[in-house]
Image: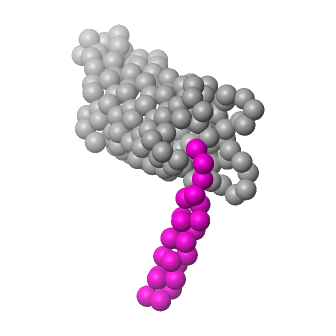
Amino acid sequence: MKKLITISFLLFAFAMSTSVNAQDYKSAVGLRLGSPWALSYKFFQNERNAIELYGAFRSYVYSSYFGINAAYQIHNQLGSTSGLKWYYGVGAGVNFYSFDTGHDLTDGGSTTIVASGYLGLEYTFADAPVSISADWVPTFRITGGDGFGDRFGADYGALSVRYIINR
């Protein structure tokens, strides 16, 4: 029990030490290049808390989907490198699937609701209106998706490039 309290205290102290930072920008728009491809808009509510909204599209041989997602992210300074932050967060979204296999019995569509976690790194250039990030987005399908296999997917994430609208 003593070890658990000590570890908890150290984790809390680390979190508090990384929580004081300045925000590098107020809002940015760009692309999430990964799984799935998406148009992204990210804005900060204060120095640490950001909301990212994105519309995603993915196409396969016999199916495609369009998704709308929102994420709440908490950013923390990483080391002494100016502009480099790590972040974590949670999100939710809805995906609309369309199937066209060429066989009438298997064609159609489906809608899924998803919950996601976010863990990533973001770097904002001081002399250019550009921010880049890389994140991992494990996702759990809450509803829908019959026939898609597992409800949990750990293979989602993206490399994002955004143009800073407001500093």
Spot occupied by residue 63 in the image (x, y as percentages of width and height): 40, 19
Q: Quadrant of the N terminus?
A: bottom left
Q: Which residues are magenta?
A: 1-23
Q: Quadrant of residue 132?
A: top right
Spot occupied by residue 43 in the image (x, y as percentages of width and height): 48, 34
Residue at horizontal 49 percent and vertical 33 percent from the top? 42
Q: Along the line of sight, which residue is nearer the eye, 125 or 122?
A: 125
Q: Quadrant of residue 109?
A: top left
Q: Main secondary structure of the magenta part?
A: helix
Decide if residue 153 is in sight here: no
Q: Along the line of sight, which residue is nearer the eye, 109 or 118?
A: 118
In the rendered image, residue 86 lying in the magenta stretch gets the answer no
Residue at horizontal 53 percent and vertical 47 percent from the top? 47
Spot occupied by residue 90 in the image (x, y as percentages of width and height): 41, 47
| Image-based side of 35 in relation to 107, left or right | right
Instruction: Work out which residue is located at the far bottom of the displayed protein and give it.
Output: 2
